[in-house]
Image (tube, rainbow, N blue to C red):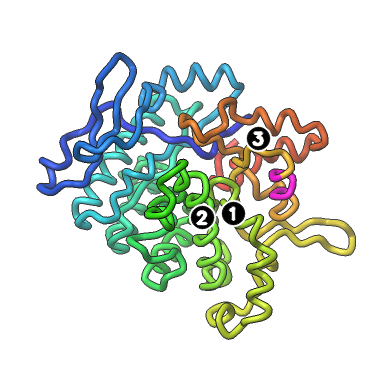
Amino acid sequence: MKIDLHTHILPERWPDLVERYGYPGFVRLEHHAPCRARMLIGDRFFREIEDNCWNPQRRIAECDECGVSMQVLSTVPVMFSYWARPADGLDLSRLLNDHLAGVIAAHPRRFTGLATVPLQDVTLAIRELERCVAAPAAGGLGLPGVQIGSNVNGENLGDASLFPFFEAAAALGAAVFVHPWEMLGRDRTERYWGSWLVGMPAETCLAVTSMLFAGVFQRLPSLRVAFAHAGGSFPGTIGRIQHGFESRPDLCAVDCAVPPRAHLAQRGADGRVTPARFYVDSLTHDEATLRGVISLFGAERVALGSDYPFPLGEARPGAMIEAMRDLDERVRSLLLGGTAREFLRLAD
């Protein structure tokens, strides 16, 4: 199977959220042409989308063209709305999650999905996570995990206030997929699409580093976390991060004494590889970079991710992996589907 871990979906329509909640800032869709819509925040244009963002039949047809067996659906990060009042964030999360579960229920062999939760209130977020991962027979949605943002209203993911959420995810066996949003330095990166090209990778790197230095992975050994876009700029920055940890432990090792590189793939004297402590997707757009990512994490921790259906994604999911002739069949199989299956604990 070819499983695409990183794809986004929206409902075709949803209620007027400004009217529903009584204050501005929420996304609305303007269907201005056949099979096309604008995402707007108030009157501010955010993004143009096509019906492959909401039409399951078109998604399935495009998957068939590229040989994708299954997509892992998640909302568009701008919908996280962590800035909203907690009760409203919960209501919006439930709306999006119920839609997601409905699409999956209609096409269970082609789609699975990751919920969204109102992380501005950890108690409510845990409650919604519990509902989403519970089996349908128990009144839940039967989803394998959750997608979260790279920060919550400026708090990094290693912040102590968020630890109970990760603790709950580990206890529930829920996979956690981290996607960048509200990128660093937006006031300096608007020109030349810098927020998306530079700010987004840096934002993901900060999310990874924050969780490492806070000791989240050490304290929760069963927690499964994956980071979008191959970990952003983390693979290219790990040498500096490790050196900083060694040279200034008074600043870097205050909450976790385990070196950053110890969380990555380890090669034993017998040549066997123990994979990294966390996962990334494969979205690098560069063969040499992907080889480096595989070396850093181990193929068991790298999963195909395309960012479908957006322009910064891979137009034909998995095409670059399939074109890399130096990858042996075991590695290729893991990247294209095996790693995602293990991360999500999908049944055969």
**Marks 2,1: beta carbons within 8 A:** yes
Q: What is the number of the mark on residue 336?
A: 3
Q: Which residues are magenta?
A: 289-294
Q: Earlier in the sequence, mark 3 or mark 1?
A: 1
Q: Give the answer, above or below, for where 101 lies relative to 158.
A: above
Is 85 drawn above or below residue 214 in the view shown? above
As rendered, which of 272 and 144 lies closer to the eye? 272
The quadrant in which the N terminus is found is top right
Residue at the spot 26% in from the left edge and 35% down from the top edge: 40
- Residue 63 image point, x, y percent: 53, 22
Q: First in sequence, mark 2 or 3: give its number.
A: 2
Q: Which mark is residue 171?
A: none
Could you tell me which residue is drawn at 59 percent across and 25 percent down?
316
Q: Residue at x 69, y 65 (%)?
A: 239
Where is mark 2, residue-wise? 204
Q: Nearer the viewer, residue 2 or 248?
A: 248
Q: Secondary structure at mark 2?
A: helix
Question: In the rendered structure, which amino acid carries the disc numbered 2?
Answer: Thr
| Camera sees residue 341 | no
Q: Are marks 3 and 1 in contact (CB under 8 Å)?
A: no
Q: Is residue 137 left or right of residue 344?
A: left
Task: Find the distance from the CA under tag 2 to the CA under tag 3.
Answer: 22 Å
Asked if residue 327 lies left or right of residue 337, the reply is right
Label placed on residue 233? 1
Image spot of residue 194 (x, y percent): 47, 46
Spatial CA distance of label 2 from label 1 is: 7 Å
Residue neighbourhood size for the residue with mark 1, other residues' Cα within 10 Å, grouped as few (<14), some (14–19), many (≥20): some
The main secondary structure of the magenta stretch is helix
Q: Earlier in the sequence, mark 2 or mark 1?
A: 2
Of the two numbered discs 2 and 3 in the rendering, the one whose residue sits closer to the viewer: 2
Is 174 colored magenta in this rendering? no
